[in-house]
Image (cartoon, rainbow, N blue to C red):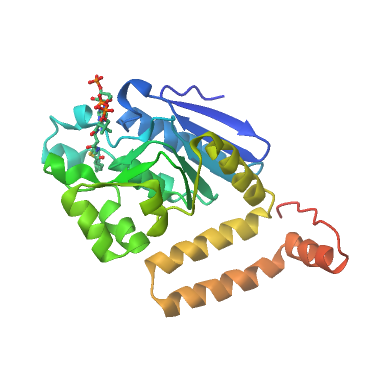
Amino acid sequence: MTEYQTIVVETRGRVGWITLNRPEALNALNSQVMRDVVDAATAFDADRGIGAIVVTGSERAFAAGADIKEMEAKTGVEMIVDGHFDAWWRFAEVRTPVIAAVSGYALGGGCELAMMCDIILAADTARFGQPEITLAVIPGMGGTQRLVRAIGYYKAAELVLTGRMMDAAEAERCGLVSRVVPAADLLAEASSVAESIAAKSLPSLYAAKAALDAALETTLAEGLRFERQAFAGLFSTADQKEGMAAFREKRRPDFTNG
Ligand code: CO8
């Protein structure tokens, strides 16, 4: 079992849990957190026994952004040449569905990490924002791109240009989060959503996630072609036969993930 310094990793049934654990810095995302989260997520992704991943933080903070103290002295050349935060892109490429369970602050890189996930569940205490402009920089882990796609240009522009935080209710209204629950229920709700996903057949989950990603990344015509191919491809799995036979026979399917 890999030892992680900044996260707690657990497997519960078919769900992999990653809990950010830097309480002294409100889970600020330094390069060690990035390495730990990316390693844990890619290990879960390579495991056929895992059908969903939950990423969460503490009650006070999902993550208050990239680690400002670590970044402060860097030069532009170092940021580019060392690719300081490049490994986060590997997190976004995980094929397994990922749920962000957000309580407290999800700011800057924290909001961007949540947006690299497929579903964002929020506690009523959650606060989202891209405050980078107050530090004289801009979002650098996808904030200007994913936030525009998630909530539309004008709302995203206001948040990115002012650095204002929005509360959980506003985040739900504008479509960034799929559900807001009382803080005390957040992990149980995340667990229930993750278990419901993880019970499905892996090939269909991977295909669904890839097709959803295509909707954000390509044209409608390309996306529709991708979806049609992926849909057809699933008819070569044993689980498709099992899923449809189970429906006809009025029983629960017994998927083998193949
Ligand atoms: N980085 C480093 N340390 C942090 C961070 C952070 N982002 N956020 C909080 N901390 C630390 C504080 O310094 C403090 O440490 P100490 O006790 O040693 O002083 C501790 O966490 C607790 O924080 P506060 O005392 O400030 O707690 P408050 O409750 O008063 O305030 C806030 C909470 C409002 C969340 C406040 O901490 C805050 O504004 N944090 C910074 C938020 C921010 O600006 N985030 C954006 C960072 S930039 C970014 O994310 C860029 C991402 C893209 C990078 C891509 C590179 C390629």
Quadrant (top left, top right, bottom left, bottom right) of the C terminus: bottom right
Relative to residue 161, is residue 60 drawn left or right?
right
Q: Nearer the viewer, residue 125 or 215?
A: 125
Which one is nearer the viewer's eye here, 86 or 102? 102
Residue 210 location (% of width, % of height):
51, 61
Residue 31 lies, with reference to residue 139, above or below; the image says above
Q: Is residue 241 left or right of residue 44?
A: right
Identified at 34% across, 42% down, the residue is 127
Q: Nearer the viewer, residue 160 or 210?
A: 160
Determine the image quadrant of residue 228: bottom right
Q: Position of residue 102 (x, y in %)?
A: 44, 40
Which residue is depicted at the point 76% across and 53% down? 255
* Residue nearest the viewer, comparing 144 with 32: 144
Query: Residue at the spot x=28%, y=52% of the render?
Result: 143
Q: Quadrant of ligand 1?
A: top left
Image coords of residue 247 (percent x, y): 81, 66
Residue found 40% across the figure and 65% down from its top: 216
**Which residue reaches farthest right?**
249
Q: Would you say 145 lies left or right of 158 here?
A: right
Q: Position of residue 211 (x, y in %)?
A: 51, 65
Residue 245 left/right relative to 162: right
- Whether residue 46 is visible, yes or no, is no
